[in-house]
Image: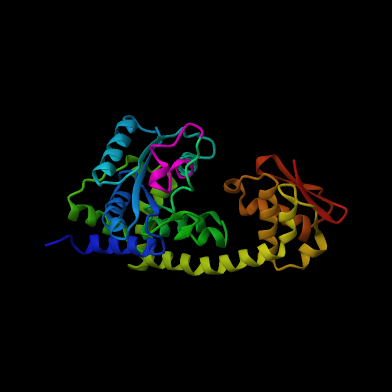
Amino acid sequence: MGPGAAVADIRNAVRDSVADLQEGDLVLVACSGGADSVALAAALAFTGPRLGLRCGGVTVDHGLQPGSDERAAGVAGFLVDLKLDPVYNIAVHVARAGGLEAAARAARYRALDEVARIAPRDPDDGPDLLPGDKPAAGPAAILLGHTLDDQAETVLLGLARGAGARSLAGMAPRRGRYRRPLLGIRRITTLTACAELGLDPWRDPHNEDSRFARTRVRHQALPALEAALGPGVTEALARTARQLRADADCLDDLAFAESGHLRQGGSDPAGLDVTWLAALPEAIRTRILREAAIMAGCPAGALSARHVQRAEELVTSWHGQRWADLPGGVRVRRRNGRLWFGG
């Protein structure tokens, strides 16, 4: 008798996620050693070669807990045992500014981006590269182990922060090379799959630490909602994310089309005509202001809805104020009927 239903569900999810790739493409799986990413790695190791894909893995050592280097080495060894190749074990430094969760996430994605830069897509680009040579374009996809439960937590956190439709849209199944095959899979399914395969995933103590907002949502807020409203809240939140993402994508496309002239000015866009901005629907105007701020140097992760609102007030609620300060040392000024973004 083969593996059970949980393993089959995850393998099918991985197969669906990579079905569009070409034979010989390299797919990497990011693995922390937790149940979600362990189940995902095992599914890729089984499914990928059957689709003609080359499959490798990445683990990131954040250095936030004693023995993290040994644990990362163990995860890398697990990936090698799955016959994944290449396997990368990347140590990162996590800055504490802006909150530990956000800083760890930023460091993790920087590491994955770096791996994508150095990982050869063609196996012939690997060991024989000469010093100074650059490998071919990197992996066709990097798989992340976020589940439906993670999606529901993200939506609830966005709702609590008043972060707007884009945040409530949650995590995208695909963004660039990153793919999330398990967004339709419950966390209990990944735990069950590990048990069916005889795998012993690591339980990260940070996932039980109530200092972190996501942990409080996971262990307090969502169970309370389930108790008050009945089962199905987690699925409903994830379903809401899917619906809002389609709306948010449409509005982003419309704003992108409206603001085409911004992209001609590089990172220092020409002043935006206030009359033009005022005539736009709010949903389009705020997206254009956000894009202009980011082009001027605002870190996207630090630019909140409140910051964009302050910039918008220079258009819709102007009573003589001259500027609004934005993250990254960017200041938006109103002068001569135009908004200017700069230092």
Q: Residue at x 33, y 63 (%)?
A: 15
Q: Residue at x 53, y 58 (%)?
A: 167
Q: Is residue 190 visible?
A: yes
**Picture coordinates of residue 131, whole percent (x, y):** 48, 31
Residue that sits furthest to the top in the current view:
66
What number of labels is visible? 0
Q: Is residue 317 visible?
A: no
Q: Quadrant of the N terminus?
A: bottom left
Quick check: 58 left or right of 297?
left
**Picture coordinates of residue 337, whole percent (x, y):** 86, 56
The answer to whether residue 307 is magenta is: no
Q: Residue at x 47, y 64 (%)?
A: 241
Q: Quarter of the image holding residue 259?
A: bottom right
Above or below: residue 248 compared with residue 312:
below
The answer to whether residue 117 is magenta is: yes
Q: Residue at x 20, y 48 (%)?
A: 199
Q: Quarter of the image holding residue 196?
A: bottom left
**Picture coordinates of residue 85, whole percent (x, y):** 32, 44
**Picture coordinates of residue 291, whole percent (x, y):** 67, 54
